[in-house]
Amino acid sequence: MTEAIKGIKLRLYPNEKQRQQLWQMFGNDRKVWNLMLGMVKKRYKNNPSSQFVNEYGMNYLLKRLKQEYPYLRTSDATSFLVVNHNLAQSFKMLFKHRGGYPRFKSRHALRQSYTGRSTCKVIAKRRIQLPKLGGIRTSKTSYIGKAKIKQYTVSYDPTGRYYLSLQVKTEINELPKTGKAVGLDVGIADLAISSDGIKYGTFHTKWLEKQDTKWQSKYSKRKYRVTVAVRQWNHNHEDIKEDISDYQNWQRAQQQKARYQQKIANQRKDYLHKLTTNLVKQYDVIVIEDLKTKNLQKNHHLAKSIANASWYQFRTMLEYKCAWYGKQLIVVKPNYTSQICSTCGYHSGKKPLEVRAWTCSKCGTNHDRDINAAVNILHKGLKAVG
């Protein structure tokens, strides 16, 4: 039995009063972020040699901010500590040349959220108590069980729905050992091909993708028409000015498009969860290839297919599930895995992608390209660990 940090996401159903409170909290977090960032920029502008205000210094200023802006007291106080932590981390990444300069947050952003560290507890099967909000209706809370809630995030996404993401600490039982090892070769037509000869297909949902494309087109056209109409109106009327946010038609299209996109993402994630859990249950040792997805996506002919296959997400799920359940994941370099004969080890040279099967000129073994690569990946992994 091991302790692990897990994430649980629940749907929230706030009432009208709670929705107003949530938007006030989103605004308060955004206000603190923008004030702190503005202070840091102004301090550096006035004196470039001055010392950077660290996370502790930002936290010390919160008391003064609450005195100047009393409405900040309506938020969970720990959410401002998280804001300061995130801003300090952003600057650390900037100084290490691993990220860009932090930017001010806009109230017009499609996604709004705040994160707190205060105590929240389950009070019923479909109800949870959150700081400042009280009891709020949720989807099933049975997923939480006896886990200890360490951090929570309330978010509003472009679909117009509210969600609660919980970071919990829980105990996980290791899975029984099977004594089996497998090599996995990832692909486009099939997401993963095992050294046992099993092919796991790539996730596809043609109807949802078609609907997403249709609503993306509707959204673009409607927003363009509204933009033109607003500009014409504002040009001809100096007394009354309009804004594109006054029109609902393009916003409805935007929300519908976002819902189809979220549905595709949720179904893909569900498929990957089921596949990775099944693999971890079956095998004690899993060997995969270390592919640089970002580099591979530079090929514009394959970029969409690679993104849809979600190789990175597939690998990430295998990594943490193997760590949870006491299994071993080995990552090897993919060099020449599809060119070497897995039977005799003869290097037959580079082959174009359209060649899916070939015969070894030395030993005469007929190979399926993907299964042969998976076997070579397994051999590499077992050799690496002795």
Image (spheres, grey):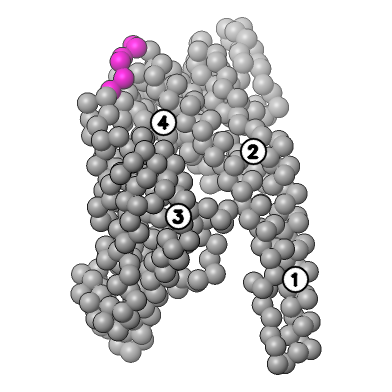
Q: Mark 2: give few (<14), some (14-19) or many (20+) Cα within 10 Å.
A: some
Q: Position of residue 73 (x, y in %)?
A: 29, 72
Task: Between residue 291 and residue 54, name the one nearer to us.
Answer: 54
Q: Nearer the viewer, mark 4 or mark 3?
A: 3
Callouts 2 and 4 close, C-beta under 8 Å: no
For disc 2, the marked residue is: 305
Q: Secondary structure at mark 4?
A: helix
Residue 361 is at least partly visible in this image: no
Instruction: Identify the residue shown where x is 68% and y is 40%.
Output: 208
**Main SS, magenta residues:** loop
For disc 4, the marked residue is: 318
Q: Position of residue 139 (x, y in %)?
A: 44, 42
What is the span of residues highlighted in magenta in the rendered image?
A: 174-179
Q: Nearer the viewer, mark 1 or mark 2?
A: 1
Q: CA distance from mark 1 to mark 4?
A: 46 Å
> Which comes sooner in the sequence, label 2 or label 4?
2
Classify residue 308 as left or right of residue 46. Answer: right
What's under tag 3, amino acid-wise? Pro
Instruction: Identify the residue shown where x is 26% and y is 82%.
Output: 67
> Which comes sooner in the sequence, label 3 or label 1?
3
What's under tag 4, amino acid-wise? Leu
Q: Position of residue 256 (x, y in %)?
A: 66, 52
For disc 3, the marked residue is: 14
Q: CA distance from mark 2 to mark 3?
A: 38 Å
Q: Nearer the viewer, mark 3 or mark 1?
A: 3
Circle number at residue 226:
1
> Which comes sooner in the sequence, label 1 or label 4?
1
Q: CA distance from mark 1 to mark 2?
A: 34 Å
What's under tag 1, amino acid-wise? Val
Q: Residue furthest top?
A: 364
Q: Nearer the viewer, mark 2 or mark 3?
A: 3
Q: Mark 4: give few (<14), some (14-19) or many (20+) Cα within 10 Å.
A: many
